Amino acid sequence: MDLNGNSVQGFVDGQEAMKQMIFRTLSTERYQFIIYPWYYGIETFDLYGEPVTYVCPELERRITEALTVDTRVTGVGDFEHDLSVKGVVHTSFTVHTIFGDIKAEKEVSI
């Protein structure tokens, strides 16, 4: 998956496939597209307007829930929240997979 060229070609497996799964899952709003099953994606729309004290722990829970649906994910941890931009929570975390650890991030406007 070439994000800069907006194309998908070839095959990947292992850790590269996991990176794509993480990106796609966290880029898809759950329940918004009928093509995806009910358990796919992450819910973020309802976090807009909520206080940071609610958003940060809830975002951790939702990221973990969204990614652990995939049986290749063994856990999610090491969450860090950057609140330096007003109205934005930028969360960095580590996804533990059977192929090794992967650093990932998710940004949510609040």
Image (spheres, helix red, strand yellow):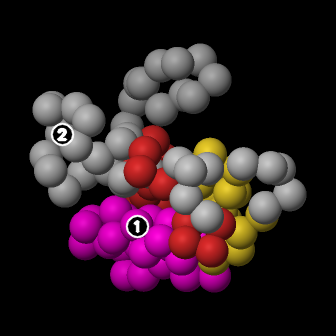
Going by the image, does 82 lie left or right of 59? Answer: right
Q: Who is closer to the viewer here, 55 or 27?
A: 55
SS under mark 2 = loop
Which residues make up the magenta segment?
A: 56-78
Measured from the top left, where is residue 5 in percent x and y? 59, 17
Residue type of the residue flagged with mark 1: Arg
Residue drawn at x 42%, y 81% as measured from the top left: 75
Q: Of residues 24 and 32, which is closer to you in this image?
A: 32
Crowding at dot 1, Cα within 10 Å, few <14 / some 14-19 / many 20+, comes out as: some
> Amino acid under label 2?
Tyr
**Is there CB contact under 8 Å for labels 2 and 1?**
no
Under tag 1, what secondary structure? helix
| Residue linked to disc 1 | 62
Q: Horizontal and vertical percent for residue 56?
A: 59, 71
The residue lying toward the viewer, choosing from 80 and 9, is: 80
What is the count of numbered marks? Answer: 2
Counting from the top left corner in percent of width and height, residue 2 is at 55, 28
Q: Is residue 104 above or below residue 2?
A: below
Q: Please state the horizontal and vertical placement of residue 17, each as a whole percent of the image.
A: 41, 51
Gap in Å between the C-alphas at discs 2 and 1? 17 Å
**Which sits earlier in the primary sequence, circle 2 or circle 1?**
2
